[in-house]
Amino acid sequence: MPADFNQAGLMMEAASTGKASRRSRKLEVQEIMLKKIRHIGVIVEDFEQAIEKFKGFGLACTEVVEVKEVGAKIAFMPVGDTLLELICHTRPATEEDKVGQLVRNQTGSLNHLCFEVDDLEASIQDFQRNGAKLVEGCPKRGAHGRIAFLYPETTAGVLIELCEV
């Protein structure tokens, strides 16, 4: 996608229709110690149903771990170099389990998962064949390409975005 940077550090991009433009600030990139996103943890209520739903969307469950000390079952599903981590609590946190209390009481939440795809229409069809429902008005232009969202009630409670770059 062509981009021209002006002296103020603003980036102008022509929208796909050529009628509009978007502006975003050019951010300085600082060297940090973080290497990559290792995993994205999602709390689920129905462990087996969530695993099967994401398998239906093309993810493989490569590992299931029960961590009895914290009262959780965890499934790992690789997506490129990142893992989707499905977490199901099997009991309430104990008084001495500060990490478990923190995780269970987390007031912020994951907004959505975005998966990069090569063919948006084909990916939408794959998800729909496995029970996902496309949000009205999608696909549409997003910040980094064409996007589509799927209703979370049809994707194991997780809002999913597909992005064709």
Image: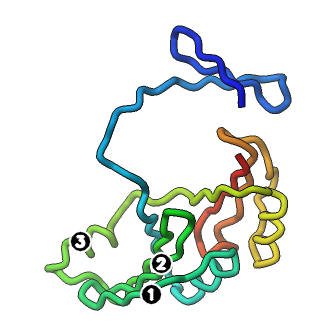
Residue identifier under label 1: 64
Q: Check disc 2 and give the amino acid type.
A: Phe
Q: Nearer the viewer, mark 1 or mark 3?
A: 1
Q: Nearer the viewer, residue 21 or 76?
A: 76
Is 21 drawn above or below residue 96 in the view shown? above
> Alpha-carbon distance for marks 2 and 1?
6 Å
Q: Residue at x 37, y 60 (%)?
A: 107
Outermost residue to the top: 7
Q: Nearer the viewer, residue 102 or 23?
A: 23
Residue 165: percent from left, percent from top: 70, 46
Mark 2 burial class by Cα count in 10 Å: few <14, some 14-19, many 20+: many
Mark 1 burial class by Cα count in 10 Å: few <14, some 14-19, many 20+: some
Q: Check disc 1 and give the amino acid type.
A: Val
Secondary structure of the residue carrying tag 3 is helix
Q: Check disc 3 and give the amino acid type.
A: Val
Residue identifier under label 2: 76
